[in-house]
């Protein structure tokens, strides 16, 4: 039906008018042609479909055949596996072949060994063939042999130590070849030196070209060794030229000659080598510097003076024999602590001369040469430290037991400065000498050990001495102490007069001297650097149990400063020690003030009980008249004690602490005169004038030793000015304020009282004080 509709639509489209019937034949032909083409396409498609079906059937048949074949093969394998599993023939065959295979492997390995040994011998012969004419060419086979030796050693480690004899043989051949090469070149230069008469040549002369060329050959031979060696390598040509001096050194200092005596190393041995270096330094530099510059100037060792400076290279060649001499000497020195101490100082001086005089760096431009001292201390530091500690403590004990140790050294400083004891001065000098013993050491742990084990130990001992002195003083001066401990009459007698002041001044002056010395040292470059190194190490060190030299972080922190290892940059090496001595100094100052106050109370006891203040006298009591009065008789002893104490302390203490102590003591005296005299008595005009005269006498004594020191008595002096107002105004000055006028105004109100005080130029008194004082006059008793 659908087809019919499409045909109908087609015909309607082609036959739309009657004229279209004229072309009906053409239309039928066209349709027939299209039908033929469609039929052809249908036939082709049918043919291709049949071929595809046939090809698919063939592939399926082939695949089925392969599957059958695989299954047959699998069955065959399974059968064979069963037969093999049931048979002992393979294992037997393997066992029979095992031994021959091992033998074959050994033969193969032996063959390879022989080939390797043959190659080693060829390399050795090749290197020999180039000497002495061409050291550079000889280095090529030698370098290959050396690399082979290193590679074998590396492979041996991975192979659990196999081929021990082979590796050892190759290494020994390489080492023997190197020694042989050096010996060959050594002999060539040695022959030349004999021809030139070395060392009997002019130190200022120039060497000839042949000499320089021979020198250069030996350097060429060593270039790889120098560049790749992790340790210092002495230059072969320098060793050759130095051998005559080494022999001479041995003859003089390593034989049975008198100059070989270990005790004479500083007198003979060190000067001999230094003079030798001075003699030949310029000769080597002028003649061989260009060669070394050409060989090493553009390499990674160009910053090492031992390879760039012939003078330093010569030192490097001479140091081994000097090291031998030092070791021999040290073997004797460790048996004699005194000799050991002096030897280490002499050795450090020798090292410093080598470093500073010849710019010798020992092949380490960053850290510098550690010196022979550093090498010796690697073994003998603990022995030396104990010896120095023993000497230092013996000297300290000697200082403390000397007859004048506890005496004040009044000549130590000018007037106005605190005077220490002789012991304090000598202890500080001892500590300074200890510093000179170790300040040239290069290892941080060694320096820190000296600081803590010797210097801080001595400081602790001296601190304990000062602390013990204060404790003994406190025991003798306290009721409880005398009751429980017991004090002899001689001990009490020693504190009479200025005895107590002297005892305390010794402690104060000694502590002050040590504190000032420690502050000064803390600002010195050596101790500042040591502190910075300690801080850096403490911050970076993760092992708190070993900060330096076997000392833990806590131990170092407790002995030196609480800020060790923190970000606080205000600390110094002597923080803890300074703090301890400051406590002793402060305590001594407090005791000094107490002694002065106690002395004043004892001395003024009779004066405070004087009953005549209210007695009316016929003597004139005008404003000027009181100066004409003599001090009260009972004031004689207090003035004498005051003068005695002032005089003693003015010589023993510095100006600042002297004024500070006396200000506190005089303030206490001011309070005592105020409460026990002024407020405890009634005063007639004559008594007030006498009291004023007495206070002026006290002020006069104070001013003689302490300019403006009597300002501590200002309140009592102003009180006496108010107390001494006249009953009647003098005829020559009728405007003078009288006692009655002052009383009337002061008791009016506070405002009027303040005006009175201002008119009298009194600044330290208040209106209530003024009323109390005016009531002390008998005229105002009511």
Image (spheres, grey):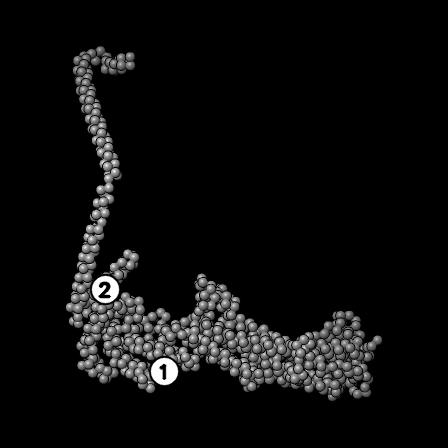
Q: Nearer the viewer, residue 520 or 362?
A: 362
Of residues 246 and 447, the one nearer the viewer is 246
Q: Quadrant of residue 741?
A: bottom right
Q: Is residue 523 visible?
A: no
Task: Residue under label 2, please give it.
Answer: 169
Classify residue 536 as left or right of residue 682. Answer: left
Return the residue found at the far right: 782
Q: Earlier in the sequence, mark 1 or mark 2?
A: 2
Camera sees residue 769: yes
* SS at badge 2: helix
- Give the residue drawn at x 22%, y 52%: 102
Question: Where does the image place residue 319, in percent across and percent down from the top left?
Answer: 31, 77
What is the quadrant of residue 724 in the picture?
bottom right
The residue under label 1 is 262
Q: Which quarter of the rendering shows the N terminus?
A: top left
Q: Is residue 416 above or below residue 543?
A: below
Q: For this view, does 616 lie left or right of residue 764?
A: right
Q: Residue at x 72, y 74 (%)?
A: 765
In this rendering, the answer to whether 300 lies above or below 99 is: below
Identify the secondary structure beneath mark 1: helix
Residue 570 image offset from top left, x and y in percent: 51, 68
State the image coordinates of residue 234 (x, y, percent, origin top left).
28, 73
Q: Position of residue 757 (x, y in %)?
A: 73, 75
């Amino acid at each position: 039906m659908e087809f019919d509709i499409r045909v109908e639509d087609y015909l309607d489209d082609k036959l739309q008018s009657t004229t279209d019937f004229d072309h009906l034949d053409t239309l039928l032909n066209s349709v027939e042609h299209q039908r033929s083409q469609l039929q052809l396409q249908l036939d082709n498609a049918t043919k291709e479909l049949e071929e595809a079906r046939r090809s698919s059937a063939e592939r399926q048949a082939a695949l089925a055949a392969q599957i059958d074949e695989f299954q047959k093969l699998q069955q065959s394998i399974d059968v064979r596996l069963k037969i093999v599993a049931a048979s002992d023939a393979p294992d037997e065959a393997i066992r029979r072949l095992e031994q021959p295979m091992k033998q074959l492997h050994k033969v193969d390995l032996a063959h390879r060994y022989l080939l390797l040994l043959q190659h080693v011998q060829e390399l050795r012969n090749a290197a020999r063939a180039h000497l002495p004419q061409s050291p550079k060419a000889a280095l090529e086979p030698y370098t290959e042999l050396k690399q082979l030796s290193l590679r074998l050693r590396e492979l041996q480690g991975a192979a659990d130590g196999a081929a021990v004899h082979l590796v050892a043989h190759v290494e020994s051949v390489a080492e023997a070849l190197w020694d042989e090469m050096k010996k060959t070149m050594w002999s060539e230069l040695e022959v030349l030196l004999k021809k030139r008469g070395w060392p009997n040549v002019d130190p200022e002369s120039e060497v000839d070209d042949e000499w320089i060329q021979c020198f250069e050959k030996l350097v060429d031979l060593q270039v790889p060794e120098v560049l790749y060696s992790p340790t210092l390598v002495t230059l072969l040509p320098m060793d050759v030229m130095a051998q005559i001096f080494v022999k001479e050194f041995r003859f003089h200092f390593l034989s049975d000659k008198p100059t070989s005596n270990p005790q004479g190393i500083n007198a003979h041995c060190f000067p001999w080598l230094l003079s030798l270096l001075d003699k030949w330094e310029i000769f080597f530099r002028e003649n061989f510097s260009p060669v070394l510059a050409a060989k090493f100037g553009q390499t990674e060792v160009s910053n090492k003076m031992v390879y760039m400076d012939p003078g330093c290279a010569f030192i490097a060649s001479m140091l081994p024999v000097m090291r031998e001499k030092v070791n021999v000497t040290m073997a004797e020195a460790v048996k004699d602590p005194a000799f050991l101490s002096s030897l280490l100082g002499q050795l450090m001086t020798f090292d410093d001369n080598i470093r500073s005089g010849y710019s010798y760096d020992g092949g380490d431009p960053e850290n510098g040469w550690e010196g022979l001292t550093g090498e010796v201390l690697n073994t003998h530091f603990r022995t030396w430290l104990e010896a120095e500690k023993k000497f230092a403590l013996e000297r300290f004990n000697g200082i403390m037991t000397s007859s004048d140790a506890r005496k004040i050294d009044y000549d130590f400083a000018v007037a106005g400065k605190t005077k220490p004891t002789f012991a304090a001065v000598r202890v500080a000098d001892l500590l300074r000498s200890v510093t000179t013993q170790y300040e040239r050491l290069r290892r941080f742990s060694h320096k820190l050990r000296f600081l803590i084990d010797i210097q801080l130990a001595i400081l602790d001992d001296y601190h304990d001495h000062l602390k013990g002195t204060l404790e003994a003083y406190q025991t003798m001066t306290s009721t409880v102490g005398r009751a429980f401990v017991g004090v002899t009459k001689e001990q009490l007698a020693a504190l009479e007069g200025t005895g107590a002041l002297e005892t305390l001044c010794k402690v104060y002056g000694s502590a002050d001297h040590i504190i000032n010395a420690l502050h000064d040292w803390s600002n010195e470059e050596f101790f500042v650097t040591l502190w910075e190194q300690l801080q850096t190490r403490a911050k970076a060190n993760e092992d708190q149990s070993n900060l330096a030299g076997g000392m833990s972080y806590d131990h170092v922190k407790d002995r030196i400063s609480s800020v060790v290892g923190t970000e606080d940059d205000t600390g110094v090496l002597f923080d803890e020690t300074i703090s301890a001595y400051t406590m002793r100094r402060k305590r001594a100052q407090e005791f000094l003030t107490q002694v002065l106050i106690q002395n004043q109370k004892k001395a003024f006891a009779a004066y405070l009980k004087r009953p005549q203040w209210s007695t009316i006298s016929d003597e004139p009591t005008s404003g000027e008249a009181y100066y004409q009065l003599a001090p009260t008789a009972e004031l004689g002893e207090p003035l004498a004690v005051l003068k005695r104490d002032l005089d003693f302390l003015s010589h023993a203490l510095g100006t600042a602490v002297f004024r500070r102590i006396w200000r506190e003591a005089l303030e206490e005296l001011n309070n005592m005169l105020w409460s026990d005299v002024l407020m405890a008595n009634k005063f007639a005009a004559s008594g007030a004038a006498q009291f004023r005269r007495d206070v002026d006498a006290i002020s006069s004594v104070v001013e003689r030793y302490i300019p403006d020191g009597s300002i501590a008595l200002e309140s009592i002096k102003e009180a006496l000015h108010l107390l001494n107002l006249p009953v009647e105004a003098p005829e020559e000055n009728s405007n003078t304020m009288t006692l009655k006028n002052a009383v009337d105004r002061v008791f009016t109100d506070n405002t009027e009282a303040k005006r009175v005080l201002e008119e009298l130029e009194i600044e330290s008194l208040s209106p209530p004080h003024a009323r109390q004082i005016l009531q002390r006059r008998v005229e105002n008793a009511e």
